[in-house]
Amino acid sequence: MQATQKPPRVQHILGVTQTSISLGSIFNADLSKCALVGMLHDRAKNLGREELLKLYNEGHISLTEEDLEFPAIWHGPAAAWIAKTEYEIDDPEILDAIEHHTLGHANPSELLSILMCADYCEPTRTHDDKHHDLQKMRTLVRQDLKRGLAAVLRSKADYLISQGKKPHSRIYETLETLE
């Protein structure tokens, strides 16, 4: 797998890592795990659709029928596979957080919640249609991780709906267990 990332992606990854560690320190999480998931969450973001489909077709990553309709989330399972095979990470909590960082799943772990919030709120993100109320979100996730993650997920769903797209059902599955 090619490791090269474009400079804006590197800045994002570093921002997510920094924010994950910061949130981890607030919520007394394992900071080494927070750093690791931040660094590896987008490890497969530079892979093309064909390469990601090849990983799926070869059985290296699993995607549901619904997942196949959302190519933007495929990099999560691929990044978890890379973390396991190239970096020899075998911690299920780390692999789960990397794999599911785009949508979450029912009853997300604290580590997954931290990564999802950090991915949305990291410092290089700027206010736009996809990331609105960033200052409010950054404050909320530091005060209440569960409520902050719920707000992040609602924002993601609202953005997709505003674009005429149907959100993945896993967003709602995750929300149901948070609210």
Image (cartoon, rainbow, N blue to C red):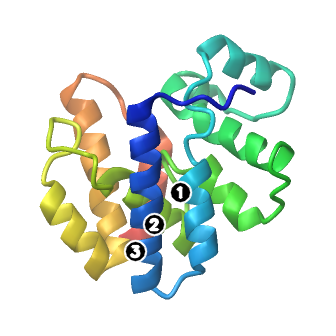
Badge 2: how crowded within 10 Å, few (<14), some, or many (20+)?
Answer: many
Mark 1 and mark 3 in contact (Cβ < 8 Å)? no
Q: Which residue is mark 1?
A: 38
- Quarter residue 54 falls in: top right
Q: Amino acid at mark 1?
A: Gly
Q: CA distance from mark 3 to mark 1?
A: 11 Å
Residue 123 place in picture, x, y as percent: 27, 55
Q: Earlier in the sequence, mark 2 or mark 1?
A: 2
Asked if the residues shown at circle 2 and circle 1 are in contact, with their CB atoms under 8 angstroms apart, the answer is yes
- On screen, residue 131 versus residue 66, left or right, reads left
Kindly identify which residue carries mark 3. 22
Please tell me which residue is depicted at 21% across the width and 62% down the height of the picture.
Answer: 137
Residue 20 is tagged as: 2
Position of the C terminus by quadrant: bottom left
Measured in 3D between alpha carbons, the distance from the residue under mark 3 to the one under mark 2, in whole angstroms, is 5 Å
Q: Looking at the image, tell me whether mark 3 or mark 1 is earlier in sequence order.
A: 3
